[in-house]
Structures are given as C-alpha cells and as structure tokens.
Amino acid sequence: MNEADIRRLCRCGACRGRIGRRINLVSLGRKATWEYPSAGNVLTGASGEAVAVVCDGCIDDKRDIVEAVEFREGAPVYHPVDELEKIPETVPG
C-alpha cells in the first residue's frame, strides 16, 4: 500500500475521519496479530507492534486511539485497540 492508497482508503484510528496532509503512523504498545504494518524497536529488538494511522487534528489534540490498522490484500482492516494484547514496556540496557 502506497501513500496515495493510504490517503484514499484509510481512516483515522482515533476519530475515524479522513487522513489530512500528513500520514501519521503511531505505534500502540499492543501486539499485532498480523504482519503489515507493524512497528519495532531497533534498540530492544522488539517487533510486531500494532500501529494506527492518525490524522493531524487527533495528533494535535492527543485523542485516544481506538483502532489499529492492518493492510490485507490492498485494503485496510481495523482492529479495536482494547482487544489487542498489551506489550510490556522494556528499557534498553
């Protein structure tokens, strides 16, 4: 899925509205049960963290994110954040 597809097909994971000027991918601290997209941490080696696409307004307003996004066969599939397993925080070192 490319930038144009994300703008055209995805909705905000907080307000469920349209994506604005920037595409903000936010890692959620929850385990993704899918492959793409997911986030990782190069310092800890962690991977497989669920992400959400969030609009500029919700980033600015620090709104709670309610759904993560998976890209499956060229289409977004949404997952309620509350239903995803929490990932324990790790501190490098």
Image: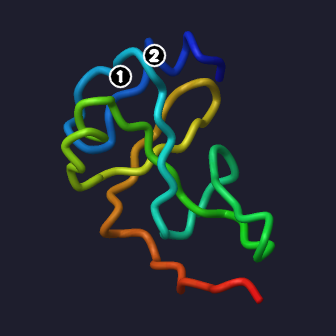
The residue shown at (33%, 42%) is 13
- In-front residue for pair 93/20: 93
> Which residue, given by chain and number where applicable, does mark 2 sit on?
7
Q: Which of marks 2 and 1 is nearer the N terminus?
A: 2
- In-front residue for pair 15/83: 15
The residue shown at (30%, 68%) is 82
**86 versus 9 height, above or below:** below
Residue type at numbered disc 2: Arg
Disc 2 element: helix
The residue shown at (44%, 12%) is 8
Disc 1 element: loop
- In-front residue for pair 2/56: 56
Q: Residue furthest front?
A: 93
The residue shown at (79%, 64%) is 42
Asked if residue 13 lies left or right of residue 50, the reply is left
Residue 93 sits in which quadrant? bottom right
Q: Do the residues labelled 2 and 1 touch (CB within 8 Å)?
A: yes
Measured as percent of width and height from the top left, residue 72 is found at 60, 36
> Which residue, given by chain and number where applicable, does mark 1 sit on?
19
Asked if residue 50 lies left or right of residue 59, the reply is right
